[in-house]
Structure formats: structure tokens, C-alpha cells
Image (cartoon, rainbow, N blue to C red):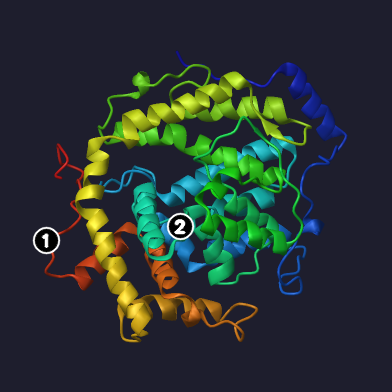
Amino acid sequence: MNKYNKLSEELQDRIREDREKHVVNPYAFKDEDIVRRNPNWDRANLWRPAFVRDTQKIMNVPYYNRYADKTQVFSFYKNDDISRRSSHVQLVSRIARSIGGVLNLNNDLIEAIALGHDIGHTPFGHEGERQLNALYHGRTGKYFNHNVHSVRVLDKMIHMNLSLQTLDGILCHNGEMEQQEYRPCRMTEFEEFDKKYEACCLDSNKIKSLTPCTLEGCVMRICDIIAYLGKDRQDAVKLGLIEDDSSFSGGVLGNSNAQIINNLTVNIIENSYGKPFISMDKEYFDMLVMAKDDNARNIYKNSDVNNMYTQSVKPMLEQVYDKLLEDARAHDKNSVLYRHHVSFVNNLISFTYDKDDYVYEETEPNQIVVDYIASMTDDYFVDLYAYLFPKSSLRVKYIGYFDSEPSV
């Protein structure tokens, strides 16, 4: 039975009254409190306010284009109807701004965090992320996590002068770790943020304790989960991996994408309006955790989804990593790494505020390799592998529109 909850009449009346009186949320982040590394470089104006500038910067960095061919969960299907990173970040942004709008938060900040949060994600979804982390950690002792790398791309690699508040929301967005209540921490200086970032590179457990420094970052974090819970189910049905969503627990959330988005949105607003935190009822939180477990059991651990990763992508990634590392250590200017990545980054750096003081080639070789691989789309990686290893028998086999069963 479809059930779409509504806000209580009492809260609706309160919100309407507050709007008529132009009540301001005292917990919303104010544009004038924005913090940048170079405060003189990106001054807000009437047509490009503080966090609108961050959004525009993110949307115009070339890596934003690559969202379109980075798969969300299902990497080996030729099907334009299933989610890519591009549709995911847009859905996160829309859900978060819907909640933020009713809570009277800073929606420009929410949008900037949402659109930038996966910019550092690897090809081949979370499995690609796990395998790249294993390679990087095995060679350096450091950890790769896509949320941390998103910050690296926008702040450490290109030096885009994004705000502390946007970067912190991106760093702390990790939607794999759900909480019933999100209370923002206090942070006003980049010195503290940089320590937070570096700790995540050195200690894998630090990721689990990250807390955004704004309510807007807290909203975006929970919305990252809301955006994929039901959408992944839609995609799995579309691909024939599951018959329908009836095998999921449902409960107060419902089973379908539309129900999950609506019912969690309503419950979060009901529990968070006028408060200095973002929260949901325990019953809803418990079902959220169960829904994630349902997805893992019915979708993410599906052998049709995972076989290609272990049989092909994993050994392909290792070969590409080692070849690129060899070229990075040799400073081979004729290599693919230099021609297609280092020169690409150098061109981006030429537009930054500190272009004369920053030399990307001096970056540690493993980091340069990770920067390059993480930047790739699925198809980019497949083409690069074929270029580097033309005689290899390894390859990714895609399931076409008209294939009746996976060809693994």
C-alpha cells in the first residue's frame, strides 16, 4: 500500500506564520560569514553571491563533466535509464534544497556541497573506490576515500579557493554512515580543516567521526543516503536484477523511491524545524538502517553486479596503476600520464589565484597516479587499459540493451 506522509497541520501553520513575519532561521549559515583561503580573490557581489560562486566554480571545472559517465552502482550495463553520478548529485541537491528551503537554511551553500560532493569519485562506483584504496594504501600506507579526494581535487590539486563551509560539507558528506541526529561542529579556520583532512588520509577510522560544521552540511549528508536508497532499487528493477521492490522491508519509509524520499523528507522537517540540529524519529532511523541493509542484500551483493569487478576490473586497475606509477617516477613527459593528466591539471592551475607558486609535478608519484585514475570515467579507464595493454585478454564486457542475461 502506497503511503505518502504529510507535515502536521500544526507545523504547516507555524511555517506559514513564520514566513508571513519573515522570520529568519538563526542557525542558518550567513553569506557574510564565508571563509576562503584567499578572501580577496572571490568577493561576493549582487549577481554572484558568496556560495553561488562556489557552485559555479564546481560546475565549470572540467571534472564536473565526467559525472555523466561515472556509474553509480551498475557499471557494466549499456542502459541510459540507470543512474550515473550526474543524476545522483542533482537528486541529492534537489532533495537537500527541498528540506533546506522549508527549514529556511542557506540553499546556495547546500547546492554547492551537493554538486561537488562526488567530484573525486572513482570509475566503477564504490568497488572501484575500494580497489584504488587497496592499491594506494599498499604502496603508501595512506588511505583513499572519495569524499576526501573530492576535497583534494577542488582544494589541494586545483586550488579553486572554494569556501571552508563548502569544502567541509563535501569532506563530511559520507553517506555510508547514517546517524539519527546531526549536530554541526564549530569550525571557522582552515588550519583546523586541514588537520581534519590530513587525519582522514592517515587514519581510516577518522572518516567515521566526521561532523559537518554547518546545518547545511548536515542536511546534505542525510540527503545523500535518501537519494540513493530508492533510486538504486529502481535501477535494479530496470535491469532485471530484482523483480520489484516488494522484497524490501518498507515499514514507515515505504518501498519505492518516491515514498522513501517523501516520507524521510517530511519526518526530517517535522523533527528539525527551528532547531540547531537535523533529526528524525527513531522509527524512521531504524528503517533507514534496515533499508540500507536490504539494498546490500538484494542489490549490492548480487553476483551479476560483482563478478566483473573481481574477474576483470581489479587486475586491470592494478596493471594500470603500476604502469602509471612507473611513468610518474620516471617523469616521462611523453607518457599518457603526462600528456593526458599532468598537462591537463597544469592548464587548470593556470586559472587559479596562486598559479605562480604551485608546481603540480612535485606531487608524490603515487598521489599523481591516484589523481589520474580517480578522475577517469568508466569508459575512459577501459579505453586507457586497451591503449596501454593492447594484447591483454582482460576486458570489461558490457551487458547491452537486448542481452537476456549477463555475459560475464
Q: Nearer the viewer, residue 375 or 266?
A: 375
Compared with 298, 118 (above or below) is: below
SS for tag 2? loop
Residue in the picture at 62% in, 54% down: 112
Q: Is residue 70 visible?
A: no
Nearest to viewer (mark 1 / mark 2): 2
The answer to which of 11 and 345 lies nearer the viewer is 345
Q: Nearer the viewer, residue 198 or 148?
A: 198
Residue in the picture at 68% in, 52% down: 108
Q: Is residue 173 left or right of residue 41?
A: left
Instruction: Say whether residue 27 is visible.
Output: yes
Left or right of 223: which side holds 12? Answer: right
- Total tally of numbered discs in the picture: 2
Spatial CA span between label 1 and label 2: 28 Å
Secondary structure beneath dot 1 equals loop
In-image side of 19 versus 179 (left or right): right
**Residue 290 location (% of width, % of height):** 46, 24
Q: Earlier in the sequence, mark 1 or mark 2?
A: 2
Query: Where is residue 174 shown, x and y percent of the image?
Result: 53, 45
The type of residue carrying mark 2 is Phe
Q: Is residue 143 above or below residue 27?
A: below
**Residue 393, labelled with which disc?**
1
Q: Which is more toward the observer, 217 or 109?
A: 217
Give the position of the C terminus as an image quadrant. Answer: top left
Q: Quadrant of residue 351?
A: bottom right
Read off the residue under disc 2. Answer: 144
